[in-house]
Amino acid sequence: MAGLTNLKLSLFPNSCSLSSLSSNPFLVSTSIFRRTSHCFPKIFAFSSNDIKVGSNIEVDGSPCKVIEFLHVKPGKGAAFVRTTLRNYVTGNSVEKTFRAGSKAFTFGVYKKHNLYIQPVDQSLRCSGAFGEQMALACVHDDADGSMSRDKLGFKCRDEIEEANIYKETKQFTYKDGAQYVFMDLTSYEEYRLNEKEVGDKAKFLKEGMDCSLLFWNGKVIDFELPITVKLTVVDVDPGVKGDTAQGGSKPATLDTGAIVSVPLFINRGEEIMVDTRNGQYMSRA
């Protein structure tokens, strides 16, 4: 595209007129075009090279979390990424393989060189191996102040769509039968998760605890505990005089029902810090 490197973002009017690939007119709001850096992610928002444990992607229209991944480069053939995914909705685990370098073109404001692009249609998503997608852009030339519209093509391989999952802090307030109730302390709105959705995390969940609820398409699909929690030992063999941190360990039952290994010097009634990721004792509180 001629003069691409000379095209820079400037102050736009409230909206700019574009034409779709079929020449149907429409308006795209440019109120989200800003000079702040956080508004401009990479031209491809998500790539197979970005996959890591904890990444959220959509597979067959469902949100999934990457729980295992492996980048593989065989002696012959193209490199690929092998993943194990947990479906947030069903709780099932599936395996899926992506070609290395696979990318997803998602919606928002993007920058390539000095061109800022506003995607305008769902059809702009990558649709298959080596499929070319077109994006329309409002651009501004600082040299003469002119505004123009252009279309820009991108090539991508397998589609990887990053799941639009966001977190909000809510407080666990109580258990209602088989449901765990979380509350927004500002609006007092309640959110409920069943026992299957909470799973093993229930053993570290305590009333009054602030947790991160995960939302997808406006629905709560999961929650995250704080990384460390303070819990009380309610049952443990008494410590013996002379026991030290290096002297071994013993099982202790906590006030949430969890059983963890603690040093021999820990006694009933003490508060301890526990890592919720692995259930390990960390220290006295």
Image (spheres, helix red, strand yellow):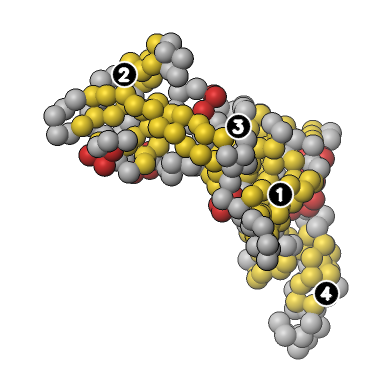
Q: Of the two numbered discs 2 and 4 on the same chain, state the one appearing first in sequence.
A: 2
Residue hosting label 3 = 127
Mark in the foreground, 3 or 1: 3
Identify the residue under disc 2: 16
Residue type beneath disc 1: Thr
Circle 1 is placed at which residue position?
A: 97
Marks 3 and 2, the one that precedes in the sequence: 2
Q: Position of residue 166 (x, y in %)?
A: 57, 38
Q: Nearer the viewer, residue 162 or 235?
A: 162
Tell me the CA gap for discs 3 and 2.
Answer: 27 Å
Tell me the mark number nearer the camera, choosing from 1 and 4.
Answer: 1
Question: 5 left or right of 29?
Answer: left
Q: Which residue is mark 4?
A: 250
The answer to whether one can see residue 66 in this image is yes
Q: Amino acid at mark 4?
A: Lys
* Type of the residue with mark 3: Ser
